Structure formats: C-alpha cells, structure tokens
Amino acid sequence: MNLLFIISWIEFSPIKPEVGLLFWSTVVFSIFWLVIGKLAFKPIIKALNDRSNTIQESLDAANRAKEEMKNLQSENERIMSEAREEKMRIIKEAKDAANSIVNDAKDKAKEEAQRITINAKNEIENAKMAALVDVKNQVGTMATDIAEKIIRRNLANDASHQEYVKKLVDEVKMN
Amino acid sequence: MINVLKIVVACFVFCTGIYAHEGHNHQHPSTTTTTTQNNGQTTNHDNTLNNSQDHSTHDHSTHSHQGHDLAAHTDCGHDSHSEFKADETAFHHISDLNVYSIGPWNFPLPCILYSKDQGWSFFSSSKFDIDNHHHGSGNKAVDRYALNMGRVMRIIDASFPMGEVSVQGFTTAETEVDGKKKEINYVCANGQKYELEKTSSVDGGLFGGGFTSFYDFSITKNVFAMLLVIGFMSILFLGMASAYRRKPSTAPTGSQKLFEPIILFLQDEVAKPFIGAKYERFMPLLLAIFFFILSLNLFGQIPFFGGANVTGNLAVTMVLAIIVFIVVNLNGNKHYWEHILWMPGIPAWVKTLITPIEILGVFIKPVTLMLRLFANITAGHIVIIIFISLIFIFGKAGAEPGAAYGASVASVLLALFISAIELLVAFIQAYVFTLLTASYIGAATEEHHHPEKNHH
C-alpha cells in the first residue's frame, strides 16, 4: 500500500476547489483588498509616510538649528575674548594715564615748591641785605654821628678822618 | 527542511494508521473493500464491490434499487465495533464543513444551495438534525439534501421525497470507474440506499471532483471563519486609519504599535525594493494579501476553536493566485510582454524555444503560489492532528488506556513543537506569498531604460 493509493480513496476535500468557497473567497478578499484597501490601508500608508517625512524634516531642522547655535556660540566667544582684551587694554591705558598725571603733578608741585622756596630765600636774602644795608647805613650814620661827635670834640671836620671811617664801614660790609 | 520533516512524520503516521487498519481486516480475510458508516464505524462487506459495479453501470436518474434491496438493508442496518482511523480524522478536520465543530458541539451554519432541478434552497444546517456525537452527520434529509460527515450532499434519485425525511445513516463504497478508484457515498433512508453527490468543484476531475448537479454557496466553516477574521481585521484597520486621521502627529497607540512595524516592513523591505517607484499603487493589494493570509493562518492555529483550515484550502489560495495573476498581467508593460513573447538579444531559433517556456511560466508562477500556501498550511494541520491521533492509535480507541497515557505525553510534546513551528510557518507563508507577488508585479512593471544594466 503506498501513500498515493491511500489519498485516492480517502476523502481529501481541501484540494477540491469548491464553487461556493471560490465565490465567497473572491467576495471577501475583494472587499478586503478594494474597500478596506481604499478606506484603511491607503490612509494608513499615507499617514505613515507623512509622519516619517515630518520626522525627517524635524531632524533636519534640529540639525540646522544645532549648527547655527554652534556658529553663534563661537561668535559669542570671539566677541567675549575681544571685549576682555579691550577691557585689559583700557584698564592699562587708564593706569598709565593716572600714573603720568600723578607724576606730572608731583613734578610740578616739586618745582613750584622749589620755586617758592627759592623766591622766599631770595626775598629773605634781599630783605636781609636791605636790612643789613639799612643797618650798615644806620650803623654808619650812627657811627659817623658818634664819631663826629667824638671827633668834633677832637678833630672837627677832619676829612681824612671821615674817609677813614668810610673805609672802615665798607670793611664791615665785607663781613 | 520543515516540509521534509512533515512528510516523513506524515508517512510514518499514515503507515501506523494503515497497520492498525490492516490488523482489523485480518478478521475478514476475504474482503476487498471497506465501507464506513455514520458513526465513524467500519464494516467490511464481501458484496460491496458488486454493488458498486452495479451502480457505476446504471443510469442514476432512472435508477431502480430493486436489484440490491437486500444488500442495502444489510448495509444500513449493520452495526459493528468502532475503530479509530487517524487519516480520516485528519482529513475530516481540515475539510470545509457545513457545521462549525468546537469540541463536542456542532454549531449549525446557514445553507445556501442551488441545483438546476430545484433552484435555490435556503435553510440552517440545524434542519438536518445534526448528530452531535459523530462528526456532524444529519439525522434528516432536507429537500433531497443530506448532511454526511458535516458536508451537504445531494441525493441524485429524483424519486426521493422532498421536505424533511429521516435517514438511518451513511455508507461509503469504493468503486472503479475507467480504471480510477472512486468513492461513492450513500444515504440510508426508508430501508434503501440512495447515492449521494458532492458539491461542484472546479478541479476538472483532477482530484476526484468536478461539476455535479448542485452548487453549495453556504456559509461553511471556512466562509464563516473568513467572514469572522477578515471582518475583525477590517474593523481593526478602519479603526487604525481613523486614529491616524484624528491625531496624525502623536505617537502610535494600541494596534497601531503592533501593525505599524509590519506595514513599514512590507513597504520598505518588500514593496519598495521589488516594485520600485510605483510601489504605492500596489500597497493595498500587498497588505491585503499579507494580512488575509496571516490572520487566517493564525486563526486556524487556535486550539479547540475548530481549526478552520481556510488558507489550507485550494479554493482560497486559488482565488488569491488568480487575483495576483490578473493584477500582474494587467499591469505588464511593453518590456514584460516583449520578454515573454519575443525575448530580445538572443538568436531567433532560441526564441522559438524560450517563448513557450516563458508563456508557461506566466501560468506556473500563480500556480506555485497557490500550491505552496495550500500545501504548507494543510500539512501543518495534518501533522498536528496526526500527533494528537497517536494517543488514540496507541490506546486503540480506549481499549488500551495505559498505552494512551504513554503516547499522550510524547504526542503532546510533539504537537507543541509542531505548533510552534506552525506559528513560524504562518508568518513565513504570508511573507513569502506577499514577497513573490511583489516580485512578479515588479518584473511586470519594471522599466528597462538601460537593458544592459539589468544583466549585472
């Protein structure tokens, strides 16, 4: 007994395409294909493709934004460092300026002080000299007067004596 | 590999079944044929062959039963001890039936019948008074229709009364017509044997079918399963589509999460590479084919749920294959037909050889689609049923309970293993059918702007 013989006498109905099942399969599959295909499969595919496009676009936009952010950041950093340098420069300049001003002022003050000191000294000297001259003259006059009085008593208008006194007064001036 | 395994196992189990069968026959060494009765019981008759030969030589429409009334009486009234036959059980379970059997219950289904003599008949198969214990045979005949092992068959004899008639049982006899063995079913009513005819099928007599006196447009088990499953899938997909319409920019939820990767896989890995730029037009067909096959494959795998063998029925796969054939050839462009009818770039005498092969190929492609799906799913169902049947074969239908317990451990493990493989096969077959459809459509619609490039 072989297998083929068995199949020939046992009822093996699935291999017989019955008219009714053909009809119903055609109806059911056609509805599933044409109606459900149009009402469900097509919108689903469209929605999926739309969404995948949206996702792709969003990713691209995000990448672009990231790139822009990166550029912006480097620009910011550049500006910051430039500003920092500028600040340092300005501070340095200001310090220098301040130093020079202070030094100038110091020098000027010193000069002024010196000038004032010299002037004062000169004035003092002049006043001293004037006073001395005055004193010498007074002293001379006084001395002459005294001497005149003495000499009048002794010599009375002796010119050689007056000359000698004058010479003595000059010698006093030398001191 | 899996198929080889299936065939080996099927052969082994068939032989086991046959061995048991032959062992039974030893009690009646003179018998030549076997007849089966209503209750799945088997009896052997010396005279059956003679009866059958009588039948085959008679004109059925004017047939008189007087010649073998005695034989008919003995056939119908006979009762013998029952015997379990795994092959018949398997073939019964994978068949399309007019009742839906779940466990011991037979749920009636609507019968829509047409015969040239009687016109249309509509009634529920419960009118046949289905016998719940024996694979859904009817205790009554209705309008010359009878329910034999769950299938509606028509009583050819015009003398059989219309309306409801009690029947006593069914017998089967094997006869030889034109050198081919043929099985003829009989119904026993009023103490007489009446020949039954099966519903029309379009196999052209190739598998023992052919056009008969009636057409069965009933909502059968397969049709019911198809309506149930595809109805469910349709509602699911319509719900998904409306969800996409209502909130197109939100994350997928529920069934969207489950089906989205599958749909995207079919679009990106099947449709786009095989069809190319025009893939979107064919997506509804590819998705319909994939989910039709997959859902029905999986539905048939549910244990204790009737095991509807829809995608393992040649009629269903034939419809799918014919639709693919029509779509492919309607969309075939100039290059496709040129390659079939007059292949460019080869000598003329070779063309005369190639053209018939190419024309044959146009038809062979859908035929392979049809047979591949049918054979894989049917084989899977048979193997699982056969493994379960091992329990009854070893237990000799309850006569040896010890052997049945032993065999049940092994057969449950084996059936579990095959069930796991069948789950895989359900996906693989749906995928393969879709993939090949896409490749055939792709070949028919491909643009050959630079033919030399296509040879790389």
Image (cartoon, coloured by chain):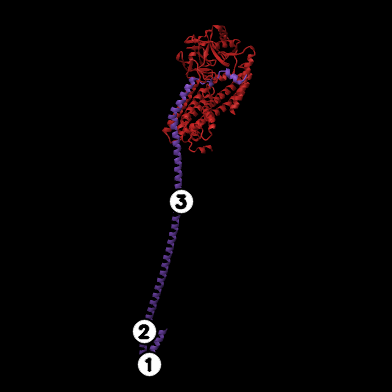
Chain colours: A purple, B red
Residue A160's disc number = 1
**In front of the other: B296 or B303:** B296
Q: Is residue B387 left or right of residue B164?
A: right
**In front of the other: B193 or B200:** B200
> Where is the N terminus of chain A found, in terms of image quarters?
top right
Of mark 2 and mark 1, the one earlier in the sequence is 2
For label 2, the crowd category at 10 Å Cα-Cα, with few meaning under 14, some 14 to 19 and many 20 or more, is: some
Mark nearest the camera among 1 and 3 is 3
Measured in 3D between alpha carbons, the distance from the residue under mark 2 to the one under mark 1, in whole angstroms, is: 20 Å
Of mark 1 and mark 3, the one earlier in the sequence is 3
Q: Position of residue B130 (x, y in %)?
A: 51, 14
Residue A137's disc number = 2
From where the camera sits, is residue B98 visible? no
Residue bearing mark 3: A74
Mark nearest the camera among 3 and 2 is 3
> Where is the C terminus of chain A found, in terms of image quarters?
bottom left
**In front of the other: B141 or B116:** B116
Looking at the image, which residue sits at the far front?
A: B349
| Amino acid on which disc 3 is placed | Ser
From where the camera sits, is residue B50 visible? yes
Q: Position of residue B122 (x, y in %)?
A: 45, 15
Measured in 3D between alpha carbons, the distance from the residue under mark 3 to the one under mark 2, in whole angstroms, is: 92 Å
